Amino acid sequence: MISAPTAIIDLLTNATANGLVERKLVWFVVRDRTTAAPIGRGVWDGSEDLAITVTSGITGFEETRDYYGAQLASVGEITCTADMTVQSCEIELTHIGDVAQQLVRQYEARLAQVEIHTLYLHPDTGMPVGTLLDWVGEIDKAPIKTPPIGSEGQIAIKTVSDIMSMLTRVNGRKSSYEDARKYAGGDEISRYASTAGSWKVPWGQKSV
């Protein structure tokens, strides 16, 4: 279950009267073709580059990321279901965007991790109110459409939902020994939580 900040709840509650302004943020984790090192790149459907803090769909922790403007053309409909069906979402990048070209040509984008957030802006000031995570998935296909002369083209990227990633995601605030100790009044119950799973205890003997 995703909990929304109070500011976003208020914004959505009053959307009928005040209006609602949304933008999409897309984060890719591709790999260097030579070293296989992971590289994060963000794009959004605004015109300027943006640095903003979002909640990671994998770790559950907040991260400040850079999102490049004038690179994202559109994000397809994201369907929410109550079953285990694997859903898909298509992302279109601008064909002439330098970051977009880099993502699919310079780096290895196959099976790259993808996160989509919605950025909510204040309808009067245009300032960011907050973000919500919409999608965690991976790239399934990333065909490049080369346009005819005089026309525009797009890079259409098909992503599929990463169900297991969402099911096994941990809450960073709950899994940390330091946080558990602080909120439990000094209780040491979580002291060995991160290592207990790897202990080897012979049958019929006590662990030391």
Image (cartoon, rainbow, N blue to C red):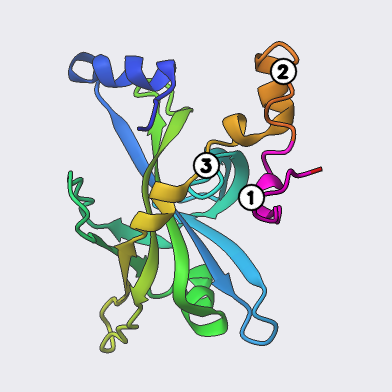
Task: Say which residue label 3 marks.
Answer: 170
Q: Is residue 25 visible?
A: no
Residue 111 position within the rendered picture, expressed as x and y whole percent measured from the top left: 44, 74
**Image quadrant in which the N terminus is located:** top left
Residue 159's place in the image compared with 102, above or below, is above
The magenta segment: 192-207
Identify the residue at image location x=70%, y=56%.
200
Would you say residue 201 sits in the magenta stretch? Answer: yes
Identify the residue at image location x=63%, y=69%.
38
- Residue 187 is tagged as 2
Categorize mark 1 by other alpha carbons within 10 Å: few (<14), some (14-19), many (20+).
few
Residue 136 position within the rendered picture, expressed as x and y whole percent measured from the top left: 39, 54
Residue 51's place in the image compared with 130, above or below, is below
The kind of residue tagged 1 is Gly
Q: Is residue 43 left or right of residue 21?
A: right
- Residue 197 is tagged as 1
The quadrant where residue 76 appears? bottom left
Looking at the image, the residue that sits furthest to the right is: 208
Viewer-proximal residue, 46 or 1? 1
Which mark is first along the chain, 1 or 3? Answer: 3
Which mark is first along the chain, 2 or 3? Answer: 3
Q: CA distance from mark 3 to mark 1?
A: 15 Å
